[in-house]
Image (cartoon, grey):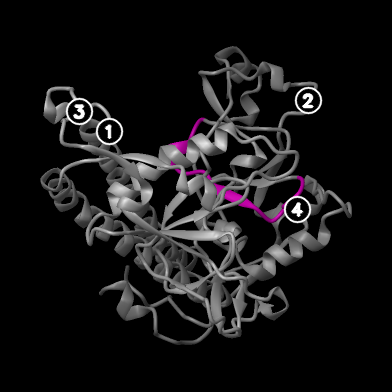
Amino acid sequence: MKLEENWGRLGMKSEFIAKPLSDLADIQTGPFGSQLHKEDYVQTGTPIVTVEHLGKKKFTEQNLPCVSDTDKARLSKYILRKGDIVFSRVGSVDRCSYVSDDYDGWMFSGRCLRVRPLSEIDSQYLYYYFTLESTKKFVRGIATGATMPSINTKFMGEVPITYPPIEVQCKIASILSTLDDKIELNNKINKNLLEQMQALYKAWFVDFEPFGGVRPSNWNDTNIYAIANIIYGAPFASKLFNTDGLGKPIIRIRDLKEQAFVTFTTEEHPKGHLIQPGDIVVGMDGEFRPYIWGNEPAWLNQRVCIFENNRPQGKAFVLYTIKPLLNKIEQTQVATTVIHIGKKDFDAFEIILPDEATLDSFDSITAPMIEQIVNNRLQNKRLEILRDTLLPKLMSGELDVSDIDL
């Protein structure tokens, strides 16, 4: 039976047990500074996870430090195993990631806590239990320190865990992880597609490989407006912003990376523009990165702009043309607080415009890739909503999975 056919089944609540985390898992703080200093980190070796690398279930793998084989052997009790859960010990103490096969054998740093479930509790069930808003609220509540909250093994061990029999735990974890696995698969597909388009763009329009390594003579030097129209966000009144879902979502710079709906507004601005799935969006303060929008329509706030492709299927060409231009501005700007970009900078963007036939060929290859990326991102948003809706219902027993055969 398909999972989708079971998600709506309601039944009697399973027999749940409540115990403190200390009865269900081994909890350990990472190595203290006296045991391992930042100076001991190396370029290659065993990755060591810090607070900055805790993401949504998976670790963020950018700029991972490593430890040498000697230090790994010396600090072997801090080696992660599949099924461990790694928490932030300071700051956002409710953040955690799950140790999958990919991270087995990695290590964790002193600003982290490692929770290793015992046989009575399923490791993925426990991870998802800690993603419940009620659990995160409890963890934040027992943390000490007003400016920089922190939590230790004793306090973490006091977190109450409510759980059904192990076979029910495994079913709950399987339902939720199936959704997360599909989201992760879509992300991997999108990453691969972006890399393919980047490589193709470089081969054709930077290295000129199809043209014998020489720029064709019929390609013209022109400005950015030959390929794109730039649409600027409107100055919506911040006093009308809300986080209660009233009105329509509005996208600010801080929302671009996760492409999540955080802020809403009831205002209908006369110069307002709705960002659409597939639009190429750029923040104009702090960092200047182009994003392919992969969520539902939303208002475009000021200091956010869209590079609207003039050619019907020319999104990829616009994306990879503006990417290095934006990066150059970001790298060369100097400011005491936050760097900015604006129309004057865009007006100075100089590009090479290939002939129509070459652009048509490039568009025919890349347009389906852009479409798939957008569809995958839209699907991920729906899967995230479904997962987050199911999570409290499954964890509370409101949705009974005991008779479901997975």
Amino acid type assigned to the residue bearing label 4 in the image: Gly
The magenta stretch spans which residues? 90-105
Q: Residue 269 in the image: state x and y as whole percent.
A: 57, 81
Residue at 52% of width from left, 53% of height from top?
343
Mark 3 burial class by Cα count in 10 Å: few <14, some 14-19, many 20+: some
Left or right of 326? Residue 8 is left
Q: Are marks 3 and 2 in contact (CB under 8 Å)?
A: no
Q: Nearer the viewer, mark 3 or mark 1?
A: 3
Q: Nearer the viewer, residue 73 or 237?
A: 237
Q: Which comes before the other along the chain, label 4 or label 1?
A: 4
Relative height, residue 73 to residue 249 (above, below):
above
State left or right for residue 220 relative to residue 51: left
- The circle drawn on residue 202 is 1
* Residue indicated by mark 3: 215
Q: Amino acid at mark 3?
A: Arg
If you read the primary sequence from the N terminus, does the residue marked by circle 3 or circle 2 appear first?
Answer: 2
Q: Name the residue: 68% across, 80% down.
A: 240
Checking the image for residue 33, the label placed there is: 2
Q: Is residue 367 left or right of residue 86?
A: left
Amino acid marked by disc 1? Lys
Magenta: main secondary structure equals loop
